[in-house]
Each structure stands twice: as C-alpha cells, then as structure tokens.
Amino acid sequence: MRSLFATIPVVVWVALAACGPSPAPHTPVGAALTPKNLSATQGLAIESACVVSGVELCFNAIDDNCNGVIDEGCGLRSGPIQLTVAWGSVPVDLDLRLTVPSGDTVSDETRTITGFRLDHDCPRDSCGEQNYENLFATEDPPLGHYIVTVKLADPIGYISPVKATLSARIGSRSYRVALEFEKVGDLRTFSFDL
Ligand SMILES: [Ca+2]
Ligand SMILES: [Ca+2]
C-alpha cells in the first residue's frame, strides 16, 4: 500500500502536465528550415536559382552575391525568414504584408508582431529614390502556412505598369519573383509552408 500512495503524486503531476497549454510547434533556426508547397499568383515564376552577378548591390531585393542574404550591408535586417520587395526610383506606394500561421499579419499598420517585424516602409520612411520594404523573422518561425502579399496601394500618378522584385530568404534558401502591377489595388501573392 505504501508504494501505491507514493506513486499518486507523480501520476497527478503527469496528468496536469498533459492538460496544460501546448506551445506552438517551432522549427529549428537557420539552415534547417525547409519550405514546402511554394506557390505564387498565377502566371508568376518563382526563381530559386541564384546566379552571382558581382558584389551585393543595395536596395534591389536581389541576392547579387548569392550568399543567401538579401541586400546585406545596406542596413536591412535579416533573420531565419527575410522578405524584401524593391521598386527602384518609381514614385509609387507598394505594400508588403506577411500573414503568419497564427493568422496575425505584419504590415505597415502593425509593423511588429510576435516573432516578426517590418523594419522599412516606403514611401513613409526615408527612401529617396531607393524604394524598398523589408520584413524579417526575429526568432525561429513557427510551423505552418505563410502568405506574402504585395499590393499597389497608390500609383501616385505613375503610369502603369509598375515593376518590382520580391525576394524571400527562408533558412539557407532564397527565392525571387518578378512582379508587375497595372492598377491600384492589384495584389500579388507568394505562399509557402514550413
Ligand atoms: Ca547577398
Ligand atoms: Ca542586392
């Protein structure tokens, strides 16, 4: 009997632990991230091959030196996920957004959510004629579905089409999508699963 009573607290503790809130599943950081089910708006090609074109150039959303980091050395933040859209000197307003597995969205309206931050927004932030928006994961990202959108929020009188480059760094892999917008409200998407 004594040994039976001695086991009861252990059983209760295990039962309570099993009933507690379970944390969201997380992937290992960095190179171990493996995106699946990549998809983009119909008609858009997702380029995964990187061709070294020279030293890294700033604010073009292209990994020119193919080291897996987009526009490094240019003041952009990076992390296990980095998303950058650039549209050069064209004076329009494009908006980069990311909806994460929890359903929360990082955007120019909510620039910081748990684990993600939009650190540059054009034309609101000082942009000159080097327009770009940059968004990155500040910690290891949760598993699930991610939806990236870029919208032509305001053409500011510019005659279409507006061309832009979207690059995504996901772990040690990077992807690039050439975007084109015709009219205000046009939306292009890129999605993936972790
Ligand atoms: Ca680079
Ligand atoms: Ca670059």
Image (cartoon, rainbow, N blue to C red):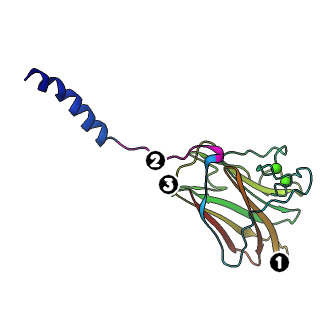
Q: Verify CB contact (< 8 Å) between mark 3 and mark 1.
A: no
Q: Which mark is residue 127?
A: none
Residue type at mark 1: give it.
Ser
Q: Quadrant of residue 61?
A: bottom right
On screen, residue 158 above or below 54: below
Where disc 2 sits, the SS reads loop
Q: Which residue is mark 3?
A: 102
Q: Magenta includes 95? A: no
Give the Cα separation between the discs numbered 1 and 2. 43 Å
Q: Secondary structure at mark 3?
A: loop
Residue 33: x %, y % from top left: 61, 50
Structural crowding at the residue carrying mark 1, measured as other residues with C-alpha within 10 Å and reported as few (<14), some (14–19) or many (≥20): few
> Quarter holding the N terminus?
top left
The quadrant in which residue 2 appears is top left
Percent position of residue 183, x then y: 75, 78
Q: Is mark 1 within 8 Å of ligand 2?
A: no
Three-letter amino acid code of the residue under disc 2 = Ala
Q: Give the residue number, with chain letter if any, for mark 1.
A: 160
Q: Are the residues flagged by discs 3 and 2 in contact, CB closer than 8 Å?
A: yes
Name the spot of residue 145 as percent of width and height, x first: 54, 60
Mark 3 vs mark 1: in front: 3
Residue occupying image coordinates x 18% and y 27%: 7
Q: Which residue is mark 2?
A: 24
The mark that comes first in sequence, 3 or 2, is 2
User: Magenta span covers which residues?
Assistant: 21-31
Number of numbered discs: 3
